[in-house]
Image: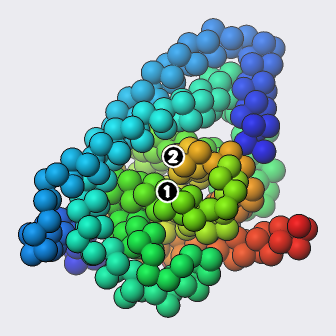
């Protein structure tokens, strides 16, 4: 499906540009965005190096294990396929915690680490496992307590109450996260039924 | 509120403190472990590059051609019939696709309508309450070389839709 979506995005864009007379912008855009991707990866690299370094120490110091045994009941319910007390649960919890506190920088490396651990447990290596999809459902729905970037921008534009949107944001994010988890369950059982 | 914001600032240094204290306690070679883990970060970032570049280029082609704008313009009157504020429709469509573009769009809406207006609050809530689905799936699946995402995209996008509708309802209801 990704292949099709990717091809369609580019094809629709080019065909539309052909009729709209925006081919020049498209050509320019292609190379500008390629450039942007390099910048983005460099930014990502700095946080990846730092956090994967710290997390390696945390793993060897058994901190992730302690964390995962503490939250075991909740995680076992969300991720029934993951073995108990496996370090992956520690990474998942660190990712969720970082997201909750609006620390996107720290959340990504921990999330990637969690994905690597889940991939090691995955049977079919090119196919997403059930746990991976549940984990990404949690991440894409953006469960957060503090939308840090948004608050910063509201402050910049002299809002009287920059943090007043925290309440509405939490309600909206809780609704979308619960929906994501329910949808995840629904599509999982449907796919199992098909196979 | 201040409590939550200050937790956010203290959690990183505190976490590092706990990790390093535990490492010293157990006589672990902390610096060597840090470097070992950090090396993984270098290779990981490099291996992510083609995934990220490919997706970013596709999004840019769609946007710079004007196709996305044309689609949004076409769909806006339909959505505002359903009670969806027209000013916010473009943000709703960009939010799951591109984090930087939606952040720029939210900033523009806040600048135009003011942070404390209905549109400003709604844009803030929409931006903050969800994450960039396409980026997350690209990065996380790319990092471990998953080619078949199965129903992950469907789940992500449908949850985004529900989140956006929820934002509109919650913001009009609370403020």
Instruction: Calculate the distance from the C-alpha at mark 2 to the C-alpha at mark 1.
Output: 8 Å
> Residue A158 location, x and y as percent?
28, 53
The answer to whether residue A51 is left or right of residue A72 is: left
Residue A177, how many percent across, how many down?
58, 72
The percent coordinates of residue A116 (x first, y second) are: 49, 56
2 and 1 marks on the same chain: no
Between B152 and A129, the one lying in front of the other is A129
Does residue B109 appear anywhere in the picture? no
Which one is nearer the viewer's eye here, B82 or A31? A31
* Label 1 crowd bin: few (<14), some (14–19), many (20+), radius 10 Å: some
| Drawn side of residue B73 relative to residue A81, left or right | right
**B23 left or right of A60 in image:** left
Q: SS class of the residue under badge 1? A: helix
Proximity of marks 2 and 1: CB atoms separated by less than 8 Å: yes
The chain that hosts pointer 1 is A
Let me know if residue B143 appears in the view: yes
| Residue most extreme to the bottom | A73
Residue A184, placed above or below residue B94: below
Instruction: State the scheme by which the image is colored.
Output: rainbow
Q: Which residue is mark 2?
A: B143
Quadrant of the image occupied by residue A61: bottom left
Q: Quadrant of the N terminus of chain B?
A: bottom left
Residue A116, numbered circle: 1
**How many C-alpha atoms fall within 10 Å of the one at disc 2: few (<14), some, or many (≥20)?**
many
The correct choice, above or below, for A1 with respect to A95 in the image is above
Q: Is residue A171 above or below residue B88?
A: below
Dot 2 falls on which chain?
B
């Amino acid at each position: 499906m990704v292949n099709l979506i990717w091809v369609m995005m580019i094809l629709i864009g080019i065909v539309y540009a052909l009729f709209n007379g925006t081919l020049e912008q498209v050509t320019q855009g292609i190379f500008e965005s390629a450039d942007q991707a390099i910048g983005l990866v460099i930014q990502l690299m700095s946080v990846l190096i730092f956090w994967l370094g710290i997390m390696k120490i945390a793993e060897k110091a058994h901190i992730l294990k302690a964390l995962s045994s503490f939250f075991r009941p909740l995680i076992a319910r969300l991720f029934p396929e993951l073995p108990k007390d496996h370090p992956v649960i520690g990474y998942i919890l660190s990712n969720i915690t970082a997201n909750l506190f609006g620390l996107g920088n720290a959340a990504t490396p921990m999330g990637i680490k969690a994905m690597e651990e889940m991939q090691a447990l995955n049977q079919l290596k090119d196919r997403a496992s059930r746990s991976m999809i549940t984990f990404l459902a949690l991440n894409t729905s953006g469960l957060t307590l503090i939308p840090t970037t948004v608050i910063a921008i509201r402050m910049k534009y002299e809002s009287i109450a920059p943090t007043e949107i925290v309440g509405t944001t939490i309600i909206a994010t809780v609704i979308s996260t619960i929906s994501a988890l329910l949808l995840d369950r629904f599509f999982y059982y449907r796919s199992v039924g098909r196979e | 509120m201040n409590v939550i914001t200050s937790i956010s600032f203290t959690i990183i240094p505190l976490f590092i403190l706990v990790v390093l204290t535990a490492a010293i306690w157990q006589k672990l070679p902390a610096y060597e472990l840090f470097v070992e883990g950090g090396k993984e970060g270098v290779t990981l970032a490099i291996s992510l590059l083609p995934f990220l570049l490919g997706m970013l280029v596709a999004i840019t082609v769609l946007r710079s051609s004007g196709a996305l704008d044309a689609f949004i313009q076409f769909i806006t009157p339909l959505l505002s019939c359903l009670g969806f504020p027209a000013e916010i429709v473009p943000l709703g469509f960009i939010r799951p696709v591109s984090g930087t573009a939606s952040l720029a769009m939210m900033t523009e809406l806040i600048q135009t309508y003011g942070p404390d207006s209905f549109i400003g609050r709604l844009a803030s809530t929409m931006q903050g309450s969800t994450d960039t689905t396409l980026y997350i799936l690209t990065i996380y699946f790319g990092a471990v070389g998953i080619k078949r995402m199965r129903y992950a995209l469907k789940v992500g996008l449908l949850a985004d839709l529900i989140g956006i509708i929820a934002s509109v309802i919650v913001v009009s209801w609370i403020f």
